[in-house]
Image (cartoon, grey):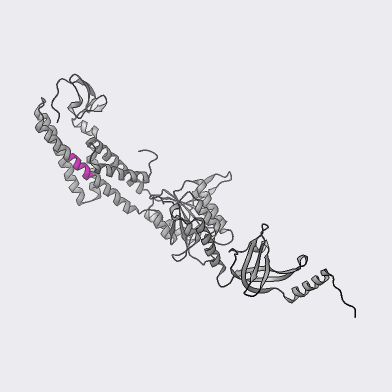
Amino acid sequence: MEKRIYTVSILTREIKALLETSFPRLWVEGEISNFKRHSSGHLYFTLKDENAQIRCAMWRFKADELRFRLEDGLKVLLEADVQVYERSGTYQLVVQQLQPAGVGELQLAFEQLKKRLQAEGLFDSDIKQELPLYPERIGIVTSPTGAAIRDIVSVIQRRYPPAEILLYPVKVQGEGAGTEIAAAIKEFNEYGNVDVLIVGRGGGSLEDLWAFNEEIVARAIFSSRIPIISAVGHEIDFSIADFVADRRAPTPSAAAEIVVPDRSELRGILAYYQERYQSHLLQKLNTFRDKIVAFQKSYAFRRPEDLLYQKVQRLDELWRLIQSNLEYTLDRKKQRLENIRLRLRALNPSEVLRRGYSICYKDGQILKDVKDVKTLDMVQVKLHKGQFISQVQMLGESE
Amino acid sequence: MKKSLTFEKAMKRLEEIGDSLESGDIALEESLKLYEEGIQLIGFCQQKLNEVEKKVQKLSRNAEGEFHTDSLDALPSKDEA
């Protein structure tokens, strides 16, 4: 019997035919090692278990569909065709589909991206931007048709109606949503005329919220010069966007609570300032009056005494008026604050002049001490109506 | 009142005025001046707080690529896409 002699090519071709027909598309589980991404975008790795290993290739058009990253040590389940590569006499698995074993692919993708961005410093607390305390213009990136925009607008308008709201409508789920959200954040930064951004959407499944776990969104939030509040889903949902944002709000409504102050609280603060100012001014006037009284007692001046008395008396009256007004203020609130405001306004210098006081200047400086003038100095005296220049004839004592 | 005055700046200044008045080492004239300024700022803030709510605007770009805003009438509105 004649020996059958194969050529290498024919043998290889027969092996190829045999192998490839005996193992139609199949599922196999194993651990990834020697993972390499070629510059062409194709992925190469070895799939192994304790006793054996097999080479695998995943072509770019399939690899691009992966939401997570392959890495050594990752346990995977994959669907593949056995393929013999004649040129090198080797066989490999050509991967059609690949999923992590034992954990959902979205979960894995989330964990991987979180770890990677964290290592890169995108979540660092010391680079978070401060939110403005009283934003005048608020930008919102969300769907124009969702519940989120309704909730945000209604809370902002209830708490702080003066705030202006500017929406950049985007798709928040499905193909291309992440890209739209990232682009909207960049648009707001280019536009520039908002003080703070809210980026988010209402609740949904992990799949629905996925856009907010995409790297492109994380990077857009990170690069934003405008501070960003993330508001994705419900309280229990954490997204990558939440970690990168300057502030995470548990829900869209909560973001609106965070972003603006409450108008009635602010009115309270303003009333408090008014009271505080008044009491300090009263204290000041009180001290001033005491000084004048002391001054008057020690002052051996040639001007008619009664004129000085008159002034002291006026100041006394003024002081009593203000004090009684303050007490009145403390009893009731708003109307009185307004009254006092008007009365105290009468204390401004031009009002004081109108009552007969005058101001004496030397070289443009208000004179407060007799030590600052010499006999024969020229001084300027300002009255309610007009002014005159006067020459110092005699000096009294300094206080 | 200056045109560039914002609520935030006014609130900050009110705080400073309060501190200055409390510091006690300023002349009466200065106190009066600060008081007057404070009262004006309080008036400004109260006026700002009394503003009525405005319509939500939508940001987009026109054909020339310039930003423009227009009112969003209904919430939620119909998706234009």
Q: Nearer the viewer, residue A279 or A363?
A: A363
In the image, residue B48 sits, relative to residue A81, either above or below, namely: above
In the image, residue A288 sits, relative to residue A192, either above or below, namely: above
Q: Which residues are magenta?
A: A278-285
Left or right of residue A147, residue A88 in this image: right
Q: Main secondary structure of the magenta part?
A: helix
In the image, residue A38 sits, relative to residue B37, either above or below, namely: below
Q: Is residue A89 visible?
A: yes
Name the image quarter holding residue A280: top left
Residue found at the very far top of the displayed protein: A376
- Quadrant for the C terminus of chain B in the image: bottom right
A283 inside magenta stretch: yes
Left or right of residue A279, residue A206 in this image: right
Q: Percent from the top left, x then y, of residue A63?
A: 64, 63
State the residue at coordinates (19%, 46%).
Answer: A326
- Quadrant for the N terminus of chain B in the image: top left
A212 inside magenta stretch: no
Q: Percent from the top left, x then y, of residue A88?
A: 76, 66
Left or right of residue A342, residue A240 in this image: right
Residue found at the very far right of the displayed protein: A1
Q: Is residue B75 visible?
A: no
Q: Percent from the top left, x then y, of residue A372?
A: 20, 26
State the residue at coordinates (72%, 74%).
Answer: A24
Q: Nearer the viewer, residue A389 or A13?
A: A13
